[in-house]
Image (cartoon, rainbow, N blue to C red):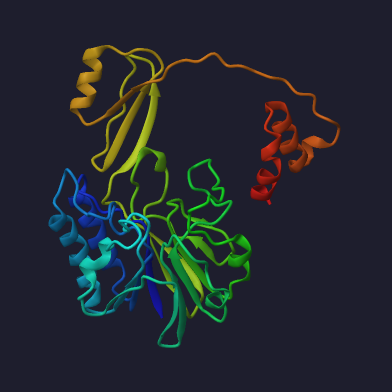
Amino acid sequence: MRIAIAADLHLKGVDLNETRRQLQDLIGSSKDCELLVLCGDIFDRPSIGDEYASTGAIAEVAIEAVASFAEHGRVVMVPGNHDYAGSGAADALHVFDRMKDVDILREPEKFAYGDLRITAVPWMWSGGLDPSLLDGIDLLFGHIRTGGALMGRHINYETKVGDWTISRAQLDNCTAKHIALGDFHGRQDLTGRGGYVGALRQVTFGEEGNPQGFEIYDTDTEQAMWVELSQCPTHRTVVLQPGEEIPQKGVAEKLRVRYLSIPDTDEVRELESRGVVVQHMIQQDERVQRAEIPEGAINDRRELIRLWAKTLGKDERVDRMIEVYE
């Protein structure tokens, strides 16, 4: 069996036409899959609509794509944190409730699809994950956070009170042959059997360089294949001095120019008229504090963490940082 898996669609009005084409490419590239799994954050906000497009216009794009896949397969999805309005409120995924061959799973649960045993984990705020849900399964998917995973290009997630999380130990001990999670947009394998599947599209400049697309998991070979899609804009940042040549902006690209000193006003206006984001980088004095490195510490990551914390007066964070490192 081949399963198409996507996460973090973040449908919104500002680039709705591009996202529609991205979804059409997803459906066209997954015609030989019999199951489509959507790992949360289908919409960018629980109200669906925004200042660029109505609720109906944005919902129509999602419904159109889901209905197209459901003509030959089944769709299962879970709400993500962006799909929820809050405790006790209806989530955005209710727009799919009456659709044929579409299942929205709003509680952690284990279910069967043919010979396949699957656990689905939606975003939640209370309770805990029953350990039995992670035992005897073939596929784990959901919208959930886990400590140490990259939540940004250089930022590792530290577990916070109020976040819906799964521990690394739970992931490691889970019997699933493949794991596909949504929430953090960078594609990353946490277990050797999968992890964060990666987002359908880049949402901000903070996701510059991230792949955008979806994966296809083959239950027979137990292999996952990434399918890159190119209809939604990618993000690119260039750093220049005022007056330097501006690179050409791609058709499906959002370009940001960061000037090292104050640029000419006319130059800024011309760039902004072309849809370029312009920023001025304020120079700051660099403050350097030197530390004596004990012999042998340079090759011991834990000792370097302790030394860093001591130098900056952040001893209270040492244990937590070492835990995240581990």
Q: Is residue 33 visible?
A: no
Q: Position of residue 305 (x, y in %)?
A: 71, 38
Vertical side of 163 occupied by 93: above or below: below
Q: Position of residue 15 (x, y in %)?
A: 21, 46
Check the image and name the residue furthest to the right.
295
Residue at screen point 28% across, 52% down:
45
Name which quarter of the figure residue 125 lies in: bottom left
Q: Which residue occupies the foreground of this view, 166 or 148?
A: 166
Residue 99 shown left or right of residue 324 in the figure: left
Q: Position of residue 50 (x, y in %)?
A: 19, 47
Residue 5 shown left or right of residue 69 in the figure: right
Q: Which residue occupies the foreground of this view, 281 or 50?
A: 50
Check the image and name the residue furthest to the bottom.
115
Q: Is residue 9 visible?
A: yes
Total tally of numbered discs in the picture: 0
Q: Position of residue 184 (x, y in %)?
A: 45, 52
- In the rendered image, the quadrant that contains the N terminus is bottom left
Residue 293 shown left or right of residue 167 in the figure: right
Vertical side of 147 occupied by 278: above or below: above
Residue at screen point 20% across, 19% down:
269
Vertical side of 303 occupied by 139: above or below: below
Residue at screen point 47% across, 54% down:
187
Residue at screen point 28% across, 30% down:
248
Name which quarter of the figure residue 290 lies in: top right
Check the image and name the residue furthest to the front.
88
Vertical side of 245 occupied by 84: above or below: below
Q: Which residue occupies the foreground of this view, 115 or 94?
A: 94
